[in-house]
Amino acid sequence: MLMKTAILISVLFAVLAGQPIFVFAQQNAQPILVEPAFQISLSKLPLKTFDSPNDNFTAIVCPDDKNTFIYRVNWQGNTGYREKQPMWKVQDCFKEMWISDDGQSIVGTKFGKGVLPSDYARDQIIFSFYNNGQLPSHVKLTELIGEFSKLEKTSAGYRWAKNIYLNDAKKLVVETVDDGNHLFNLATGKPILLENAKFAQTNWKVFRDLRRCYEFQYPNDYLIDPPTLINPLITDFLLKKEKIRWLIHVSAEETRDRQERNRAAHMTFEDFVIERIKPMYQADGADSSQYATDLVKKEAFKNQNDLNVLSFYLTVVNETFSEDPKESTMEKRSEGPIYAVSISLPNTPHKALILRPIDEGTKSKENGEILRKMVDTVRILQ
C-alpha cells in the first residue's frame, strides 16, 4: 500500500511539473489515452474533455480561461498519445461539445442536457459552430423550437431537447421536445434537409433511424416495438401484426469502439455478419444447448437502392443432455431466409441491418414475401 501511494504522489508531481508520463498498454487491453502534462494552475481545474467519434482528436475546455484547445491523438496499437501542442483553439467554452473526425470542426452549447435556465430568451444562442478557429456561426432557440408551450418545466429550468448527437454521417442531430428533428452540417452550421425518397411501396409506413442513418418501409398493418430508438444502445426491435406473435426481428449491427473497428477492418462483410448473427441463436440451459453452425443457401445481390445484401439460411443445432448417453439428443434445423443489408457509409467500418423471421414469421409464406420487399426498401440517409 505504501509503495502504491508513493507512485501516485510521484505521478501527481510529474503532471504538475509538466513532465511526460509513459504508460505501457497490455496487449488486447482496452484503448488507453496517454495525455502529456497540461500546464495549468490548480485554481483552474478541473478540465473538461471531449473526443471525436473516431478518437483521433480531443478537445480540452478550460472553464476559467474560457478557452477551448483542439489536439490530435496519435495511436500506437491500443494506446493513444495526445500531442503537446494544440492544432487550434478558440476563446469560448461549453458545457457540451462535439468534434468532427478530421478535428477541423466543433460545435458547442453552453446549456447541458438540453435544459435552459428559467430566465431563458427565445433568441438565445444554443449552438456555436467553429471551423479551424474561424469566427463561429450560431443557431438560436427560435430556429429549433416551433411550439414554446411544449418546453418541459424541470427543477433546473426548461427542457427543450430530447437528444443531441453526432450521427454516423457526422451530422449534428437535434431532437426537440416539440417533436422536431433538425440536422446541421458540422463544418458550416447550416441546416440540412433530408431528401424525400421515391418509396417502392407507396402505401407502407417508414421507419427512420437518424442516428445510424438508414430507413426502410414496412406494411401499414405491422407494428414496431419500440417505435423509436431513443436509447443509443438499443439497436434491435420487432415487428408484428395485431393479435399475432412476433414476425420479424430487425437489428442494426455496428462497431462501438476502437477495438471493434480495428477488428472489423480486417473482415469481409460476410465474416462480420456471421460473427454478429450466430449469438442471436445461442442459448444454454442446465441440460440443453442451442447454437448456430454455418450459413447455407447463400446469395449476394443488390437491393433497389443499390445496397449490397447477403441472403442466407442458418443451420441451428439443439442438443439435450442426459446422464444416460442414449437419451441425449441432437437435432438440426434451418433458419431463414435471413437478410443482411450493408448500411455502412463510404470509408467507414462494416455496419449491417439484419432482418430475419422469428416466431410465427418463420411459418408464414406471406411474411417471407413481405420481408423480401422490406429488404428492397432499405436505404442510407446521407
Image (cartoon, rainbow, N blue to C red):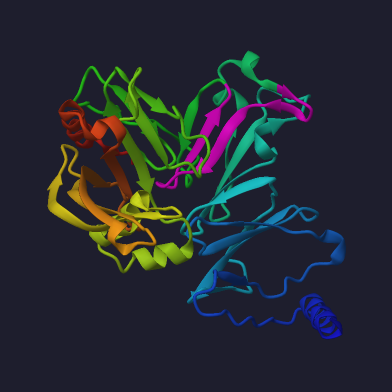
Name the magenta segment's main secondary structure. Answer: strand
Give above or below for 58 relative to 233. Answer: below
Task: State whether residue 138 is above or below residue 106.
Answer: above
Instruction: Using the rendered image of the protein, determine whether residue 215 is visible from the camera's viewpoint.
Output: no
Give x and y (percent) for residue 309: 19, 47
Q: What stretch is highlighted in magenta?
A: 153-177
The N terminus sits in image quarter: bottom right
Residue 319 falls in image quadrant? bottom left
Is residue 49 something that shows in the picture?
A: yes
Q: Is residue 170 magenta?
A: yes
Q: Position of residue 143 (x, y in %)?
A: 55, 25
The vertical placement of 7 against 135, above or below, is: below
Seen at 19% across and 38% down, the residue is 305
* Residue at point 34%, 26% (across, down): 245
Q: How many dots with numbers?
A: 0
Q: Which residue is drawn at 30% across and 36% down?
A: 358
Left or right: residue 69 versus residue 7 is left
Toward the bottom, the furthest residue is 3
**Quadrant in the rendering for residue 269:** bottom left
Q: Locate residue 201, reporting x and y percent.
A: 20, 23
Q: Where is residue 81 in the image (x, y as percent from the top left)?
A: 58, 74
Given residues 202 and 50, the one toward you in this image is 202
